[in-house]
Amino acid sequence: MRVIGGRLRGTRLQPLKGQALRPTLDRVRESLFNIVGAGIEGARVLDLFAGTGAVGIEALSRGASRVAFVEANARVRDLLHGNLEKCRLTFSGTEGSSNWTLLPVTARQALDRLQNQGEVFDWVYVDPPFDADLYTETLTGLAASGLLAERAEVVAEHFHKTALAENYGKLKKLQTRRTGDTCLSFFMLESLE
């Protein structure tokens, strides 16, 4: 597992051994960022169910202005923080820097906390455990939260046999792309016009 592009390209990230953690594969991240392209540059990114941090770190490597990582599992958070250190994105072991924060809460709690802080994101990555039924709760919560900028894009990673709805509140599915057993579904807020 490595950073695919940007200034950190080639940096190897550590996976969590012996856990049922399913990191986003290199080829899936490569496909994702090929689709997103330069749209990530300068973006404010929310990485829900961050795991190893590979997606958020990739976004920082490619020029995202800020990433909020959300990971509830303490052991996985330690690994994520280690990957941030390996990429030289930490300063003196801090839990954040000028361009990233790590929230030690569930996705649902993070949506509430970030909204209360007045945060707004341009790009959100949603990657819950494939066997957990968290897509509807998370995507509907995002749509209702006020955390999404006007042209925000939400990407949900899911197993190819898991069909996501066409709409979650105000979030409308634009497309789904498959890479191996993994699908990426892209959503945007419906236009008010």
Image (spheres, grey):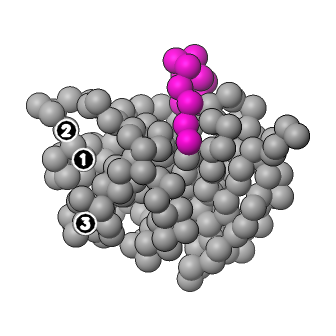
Q: Are marks 1 and 3 in contact (CB under 8 Å)?
A: no
Residue drawn at the location 66% of the way across and 44% of the way down:
151
Q: Are marks 2 and 1 in contact (CB under 8 Å)?
A: yes
**Does residue 187 appear to the left or right of 102 in the view shown?**
right
Say above or below: 146 vs 179. above
State the residue position of label 3: 9
When asked about the image quadrant of residue 127, the answer is bottom right
State the residue position of label 1: 84
* Place of residue 56 in the rendered image (x, y in percent of width and height, measured from the top left): 40, 50
Q: Amino acid at mark 1?
A: Leu
Q: Nearer the viewer, residue 150 or 31?
A: 150
Mark 2 Cα-neighbour bin, 10 Å: few <14, some 14–19, many ≥20: some
Residue drawn at the location 51% of the way across and 55% of the way down:
39
**Does residue 159 appear to the left or right of 191 in the view shown?**
left
Q: Look at the image and give the residue range highlighted in magenta.
A: 110-122
- Residue placed furthest toward the top: 116
